[in-house]
Image: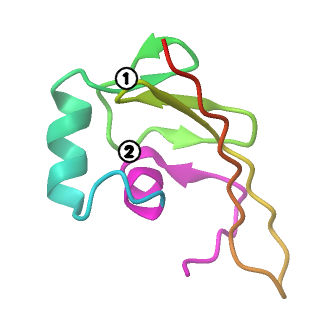
Amino acid sequence: MKKIRDNTIKLNQFLKLMGIVPTGGQAKLMIQGGDVQVNGMLETRRGRRLVPGDQVTIQGQTLEVNLNNNEDQDVVINLAEETE
């Protein structure tokens, strides 16, 4: 699993890590296609840096970013699902 060093993660990497998309190309298409919101706002930049507490909404679910950055630990991300 990818280690996070600066307590941020790019939006496209987050989508891949969460298993929403299998490839970076698909993440790019979803983001640029207007299918992703960050903190309730449409986000079309795949390089958008996410920080702990950000909420990413895609395909009817909301994922909350919680990055535990510890030299001995891998990335931990909490899911907060919402259906509308």
Instruction: Give the colour scheme shown.
Output: rainbow
Picture quadrant where residue 9 is located: bottom right
Vertical comparison of 74 with 38: above or below: below
Picture quadrant where residue 19 is located: bottom left
Q: Amino acid at mark 1?
A: Glu
Please tell me which residue lies in front, 82 or 29. 82
Q: What residue lies at 55% left-to-right and 77% top-to-bottom?
A: 2
Q: Amino acid at mark 2?
A: Gly
* x and y, in percent, of residue 73 in the image: 80, 81
Q: Is residue 14 left or right of residue 24?
A: right
Q: Is residue 60 left or right of residue 78?
A: left
Residue lying furthest front in this view?
Answer: 83
Magenta residue span = 1-17
* Residue labelled with disc 2: 47
Q: How far apart are the alpha carbons under marks 2 and 1?
A: 10 Å
Vertical comparison of 47 with 39: above or below: below
Q: What residue lies at 20% left-to-right and 45% top-to-bottom?
A: 28
Q: What residue lies at 68% left-to-right and 56% top-to-bottom?
A: 77
SS for callout 1: loop
* Residue labelled with disc 1: 43
* x and y, in percent, of residue 45 in the image: 32, 33
Vertical comparison of 64 with 82: above or below: below
Please tell me which residue lies in front, 49 or 21. 21
Q: What residue lies at 65% left-to-right and 45% top-to-bottom?
A: 79
* x and y, in percent, of residue 3 in the image: 63, 77
Mark 2 vs mark 1, foreground winner is: 1
Say if mark 2 contacts mark 1, CB within 8 Å: no
Q: Quadrant of the N terminus?
A: bottom right
Please tell me which residue lies in front, 82 or 41. 82
